[in-house]
Image (cartoon, rainbow, N blue to C red):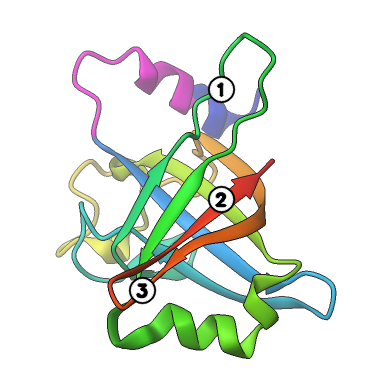
């Protein structure tokens, strides 16, 4: 286990852990344009862009469900709903073949490990650590299940 993973394991048992932040990286087409992606976070903890591992993540309202792993052998089929303000996601879908061959990476870490740039005067916990990830999960886009002016919802597969 690496140094960052050791920290994460200790924080899971901490009596006063900081909040966990979910970060997403959406690769539009892993076949034709594997290097083209957008990075974002849900914006609930930070209402503005944040930096993690030296990369910017835009604040875009997101709701997720079904990422849980259970012991009954069922493969998780999570859903993600992304705000479609000004038809932002609709435009991305049009430009990228409805996310055919798209991939989503979900990263999770504790707020206290975010880059110093996210805090006025540096990280108040003094523990910025880009190697301290709770998880780094990869999902493929299975299907678009809803699209309207408020949000676009997708079903994912692992």
Q: CA distance from mark 2 to mark 1?
A: 16 Å
Q: Residue furthest right?
A: 31
Quadrant in which the N terminus appears = top right
- Badge 3 crowding class, 10 Å Cα cut-off, few under 14, some 14 to 19, many 20 or more, is few
Q: Quadrant of residue 111?
A: top left
The residue depicted at 83 percent of the width and 80 percent of the height is 32
The residue depicted at 48 percent of the width and 66 percent of the height is 54
Whether 21 is drawn above or below 152: the answer is above
Label 1, on which residue?
A: 69
- For numbered disc 3, what is the local secondary structure? loop
Q: Quadrant of residue 127?
A: top left
| Disc ID at residue 148 | 3
Whether 20 is drawn above or below 89: the answer is above
Whether 119 is drawn above or below 73: the answer is below
**Residue 24 appears anywhere in the view:** yes
Q: Which residues are magenta?
A: 7-18
Q: Quadrant of residue 46?
A: bottom left
The residue depicted at 42 percent of the width and 66 percent of the height is 40
Q: Nearer the viewer, residue 87 or 54?
A: 87
**12 is within the stretch colored magenta:** yes
Decide which of tag 2 and tag 1 comes sooner along the chain.
1
| Disc ID at residue 155 | 2
- For numbered disc 2, what is the local secondary structure? strand
Decide which of tag 3 and tag 1 comes sooner along the chain.
1
Residue 150 coordinates in the image, percent (x, y): 28, 72
Residue 144 coordinates in the image, percent (x, y): 56, 62
Q: Nearer the viewer, residue 75 or 122?
A: 75
């Amino acid at each position: 286990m690496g140094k960052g993973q050791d920290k994460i394991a200790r924080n899971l048992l901490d009596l006063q852990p900081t909040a966990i932040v979910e970060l997403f990286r959406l690769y539009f087409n892993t076949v034709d344009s594997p290097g083209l992606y957008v990075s974002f976070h849900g914006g609930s903890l930070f209402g503005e862009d944040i930096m993690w591992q030296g990369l910017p993540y835009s604040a875009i309202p997101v709701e997720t469900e079904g990422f849980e792993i259970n012991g009954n052998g069922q493969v998780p089929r999570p859903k993600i709903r992304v705000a479609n303000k000004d038809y932002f996601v609709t435009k991305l879908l049009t430009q990228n073949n409805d996310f055919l061959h798209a991939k989503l990476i979900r990263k999770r870490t504790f707020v206290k490990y975010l880059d110093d740039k996210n805090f006025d005067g540096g990280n108040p916990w003094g523990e910025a650590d880009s190697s301290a990830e709770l998880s780094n999960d990869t999902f493929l886009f299975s299907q678009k299940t809803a699209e309207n002016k408020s949000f676009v919802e997708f079903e994912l597969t692992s």
